[in-house]
Image (spheres, rainbow, N blue to C red):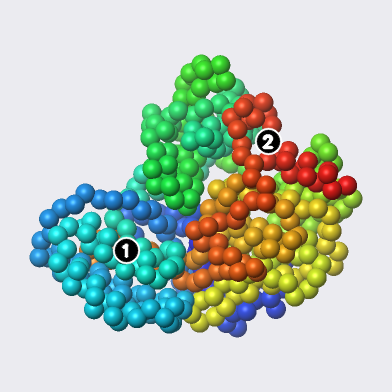
Amino acid sequence: MLVVGVSLLLLQAASPSTINAKRGKVILLISRDFSRNYGSTAGLKLTWISYRMKRILIFWVLLTSSAAAAQLTSRETAANLESFEQVWRTVRDRHPDPTLNGLNWQAMHDEVRPRVAAAKSMAEVRDTLNSMLTKLGASHYAVIPNDLYQPITDLPSGGNATPGFTTTVVDGKAVVGSVEPDSPAARAGLHPGMSLESINGESVADLLKLSESNGDQETRRLVRQSVSRKLKGAETERVGIDVVDDKGRKQHLDLDRVEPKGKLVTFGNLPEQRVYFESRRLPGGAGYMHFNEFLDPVSIIPQLEAALKEFAKAPGIVLDLRGNPGGIGIMAMGIAGFFVSKPGLKLGEMKMRETTLKFVIFPRPEPYAGPLAVLVDGGSASTSEILAQGLQDLGRARIFGSRTAGAALPSDIVRLPNGDGFQYAQASYTSEKGKVLEGNGVTPDEEVRETQEALLAGRDPVIDAAEKWILSRR
């Protein structure tokens, strides 16, 4: 997640009075997926970007693994000691809780430094530092090797054009999730549920092994999204894929790429993003709404409001946040106001060392009062999780799908003198009922998973379950 301090913007998403922060600033929560668009992660350093005399912090993502042990030289030991001091000072100075939950941090320094000095390998150094950081009892504090990012952070070369289909992971296997009508993929006969074996000759199964072996929810999300990124590139370049249909027949396809759907949106110094909103009536009459990112509130909010007016008499609403990596935090407050009538309620709060952001809901004049189903999955992160968990806590929505990413905190990774990265949190977040989202995610009220069989049959079991619940409330 990215935290951005900028001049106060006139957003339709929420009333400025709901922001409990320093005067003249708002806090913007951007999923860590966006930060990878800034360039290669080889630098692993904190990037400062000037924006109207404010500063933007770009936060990279933690991926843990082990590295081969190697005998240390005296110069490497000196760099490790410098790194230890930087880690220790950063926690002392930047942890959201100045008391560190009562932990004697100076005593920890005196205990750990000699162990770092005596370490015989980089693996031992990392284990020692990470053991120290676990004493904090908080997520997003870790030392990571400098060579673990490349497999999942390779950016598409030359552009973001796509062949017109999305991917999902079902039972550890990459499959086609959806296909855009009249896209290169559709014209080539691709359809949901087909297995995806390779992209430009690279095995997809090998890439997915990274996530399955790690076991961390956030790592799995990032690795799986990297499959989709590998499909992107310049419009002038084709992408080669190998797929298997429902009959077990293998097929190689060379697909053209086209610009993806959605409005090109710029925000501050962020790179251009494609943002789209879609709505429709489901077979049983419920209204369905989906948008891909919490960005461009001046466009998304009016479209959501217009859809809700159209669905005013609908038996219920399905809000699909699957695959939504987050975005502008205050949009969660504004969107919640379309479904909550009582003023003064909040989704939760984020505490930083110097300020607290309360996600207070600003009710709309005529909020929708019918049943609300929110759909989530492992790709739902950041602001998506804040909105879903908050509505669940308030008893205003029933959550369907699978557990979310558990990636709600703003964090940063800096380069250490020894070349490793150090990730640390900038804040803590708890939902209205005190649930910690980071590392835990949102647990659905009704867990429903996609199946390859359902995709091949053209069904979405998560939407089906949500609409079934809505119709049962009549």
Secondary structure, mark 2, is loop
Q: Position of residue 252 (x, y in %)?
A: 47, 21
Q: In the figure, 196 relative to 468: above or below?
A: above
Query: Which residue is at a point 29% across and 76% down the rendered structure image?
Result: 108
Count of numbered tags: 2
86 with respect to 304 (left or right):
left
Q: Nearer the viewer, residue 366 or 404?
A: 404
Label 2 environment density (alpha carbons within 10 Å; few <14, some 14–19, many ≥20): some
| Callouts 1 and 2 close, C-beta under 8 Å | no
Residue 45 visible (yes or no): no
367 with respect to 162 (left or right):
right
Q: In the figure, 18 relative to 63: above or below?
A: below
User: Which image quadrant for residue 419?
Assistant: bottom left
Q: Amino acid at mark 1?
A: Asn
Query: Which residue is at a point 73% across and 72% down the rendered structure image?
Result: 345
Query: Which residue is at a point 44% across and 78% down the rendered structure image?
Result: 101
Q: CA distance from mark 1 to mark 2?
A: 42 Å
Residue 201 visible (yes or no): yes
User: Which image quadrant for residue 362?
Assistant: bottom right
Q: Position of residue 201 (x, y in %)?
A: 38, 28
Label 1 environment density (alpha carbons within 10 Å; few <14, some 14–19, many ≥20): some
Residue 130, numbered circle: 1
143 with respect to 320 (left or right):
left
Instruction: Please identify, in this view, whether the residue under mark 1 or under mark 2 is nearer the observer.
Output: 1
Of marks 1 and 2, which one's residue comes earlier in the chain? Answer: 1
Q: In the figure, 86 relative to 294: above or below?
A: below
Q: Position of residue 373 (x, y in %)?
A: 74, 50
Q: Position of residue 183 (x, y in %)?
A: 61, 31
Q: Please identify the residue farthest to the left as the structure is shown.
A: 74
Q: Amino acid at mark 2?
A: Asp
Q: Which residue is mark 2?
A: 460
Residue 470, numbered circle: none
